Image (cartoon, rainbow, N blue to C red):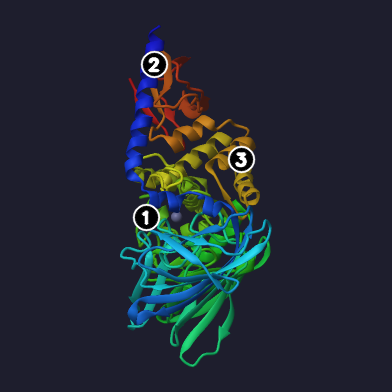
Amino acid sequence: MKLKYVCLIIVILSTFSVKAQLLQNKGKFTHQDTLRGSITPERAWWDLTYYFLDLKIFESKKYISGVNTIKYKVLKPHQVIQIDLQKPMQIISVSQDGKKLRVKREGNAHFVTLKKTQIIDEINTLSVVFEGKPKEAKRAPWDGGFSWKKDQNGKHFIATSCQGLGASVWWPNKDHMYDEVDSMHIRITAPKDLIPVSNGRLVHIQDHPKANIYTWFVNNPINNYGVNVNIGDYVNFSEVFKGEKGDLDMDYWVLKDNLELAKAHFKDAPKMMKAFEHWFGPYPFYEDSFKLVEVPYLGMEHQSSVTYGNQYKQGYLGRDLSGTGWGLKFDFIIIHEAGHEWFANNITNKDIADMWIHEGFTSYSENLFLDYYYGKEASADYVIGTRANIQNDKPLIGTYNVNNEGSSDMYYKGANMLHTLRQLIEDDEKWRQILRGLNSEFYHQTVTTKQIEDYLSEHSGIDLTAFFNQYLRTTKIPTLEYEIKAGELKYRWTDIVEGFDMPIQIDIDGKSEWLFPKAEWQTKNIKSDSFNIDRDFYVNSNKI
Ligand SMILES: [Zn+2]
């Protein structure tokens, strides 16, 4: 009877909190958030196949203009198409087969009425002419937009970044993560004394007396925020990495004055490639090469042109995020941002609410890099050290369909959740094959959390439903509550979701063994008056 009342109260409380959350969210998100963050009817009917982004830069006016030619396949007939471009950028005109089309602007979404009848399976083309003074990034890459900076010689040093905010902050496109373009050209017209560097490979340099016109080609699916333009007084050096899929071109574009510094410092790049191919499988974009491109901000995981601004320092701008010393054994930006080539660029979240898939696995990759070169203890020290950064303020998963990210705990709580999972699997080779398996199963795809959860449950042989509900969907850390009295250990889990019964390893009576706590109290005979929980498990304990 008593239990029933408790359950009823919990049901009432949780219904109340779900409702309160919904009400809170209702006020928090706008119609614009829905247009930006959901698969609207004007997006759902077509599949993006190709972009040709032709961009001109007017650096002295901080102004850009261009044309994006969009190819798409008709999935079902519809006559209105949604194209996104954020204020204060302007769409000048949209045309199809030479005919100008009517455009209705609703904030950042543009609804274009098509004249030509859209027939299933046909590939159609849309030309979008645009211009404007794009939002200037004040704290790149955190806020996003254009960075209009100067290098130490007073030359223009320009870069874009737009994670979260969206690529439509500077160019018109289908700005939702679920649909990646299959391939893309980016042509940039920049001042004659500067070099424009973008994603993929440089395929054409156009002769022009007053401008540098460079065309880059990306031969793989790419997410919108991964597309970037960088313009600077660059020099280039390169090397060939003998990788799992053969020869991989690794190219480095750095400011002229930093060439010698970069040649020494970027030795971490092939080291990174070796370690990550071991753990995650082949680099996912051999056709497009791998590049590091120096930028005037910290860095970003731009696909096949990872941007770099860590000032040629070890750690995170010279700091160790783990507080253990191990974080100074590598350049954080080279390792972390390149780790995203597997988790963010290869495996991409469909909805940004599931961004933990990008940041959780990539933060976890930092300790796998250490594991490869310094061993398991070093890697454990590092990932456990990063727990100090966890806030437990909000769940890792955000709100779906409104372009909303979850807590910044997606980084180090995400990494510690995966480190805990490695312990449960108890077989490092199996764990490595699972990480590689994720990258081949979801090769060049956009995914949901559910797909990742299901894959991990199936291939580990453990039902991880409650495990992920606990760590991804609540802020509660499982707490082992226990009491030791008269040679008996009494223990149970508290602060857990329904069905959570994760086993943990403990050191007890001079040996290591598994303990299987549940929500209900259990007992076990114990000789000593204390025991230790293996530090690799991200849990709390409470002696009562
Ligand atoms: Zn990241």
Q: Residue at x 61, y 55 (%)?
A: 444
As shown in the figure, which amino acid type bears the numbered disc 3? Tyr
CA gap, disc 1 to disc 2?
Answer: 47 Å
**Where on the picture, by quarter, is residue 426?**
top right
Closer mark to the observer between disc 1 and disc 2:
2
**Where on the picture, by quarter, is residue 238?**
bottom right
Closer mark to the observer between disc 3 and disc 2:
2
Q: Where is residue 492? Give x, y as percent.
A: 43, 20
Would you name the residue on which mark 3 appears? 455
As shown in the figure, which amino acid type bears the numbered disc 1? Asp
Would you name the residue on which mark 1 appears? 320
- N-terminal label among 1 and 2: 2
Specify few, some or many for label 3: CA neighbours under 10 Å numbering under 14, 14-19, or 20 or more: some
Residue 484 in sight: no
Q: Which structural element holds mark 2? A: helix
Relative to 265, is 119 above or below?
above
Mark 3 and mark 1 in contact? Answer it, CB < 8 Å. Answer: no
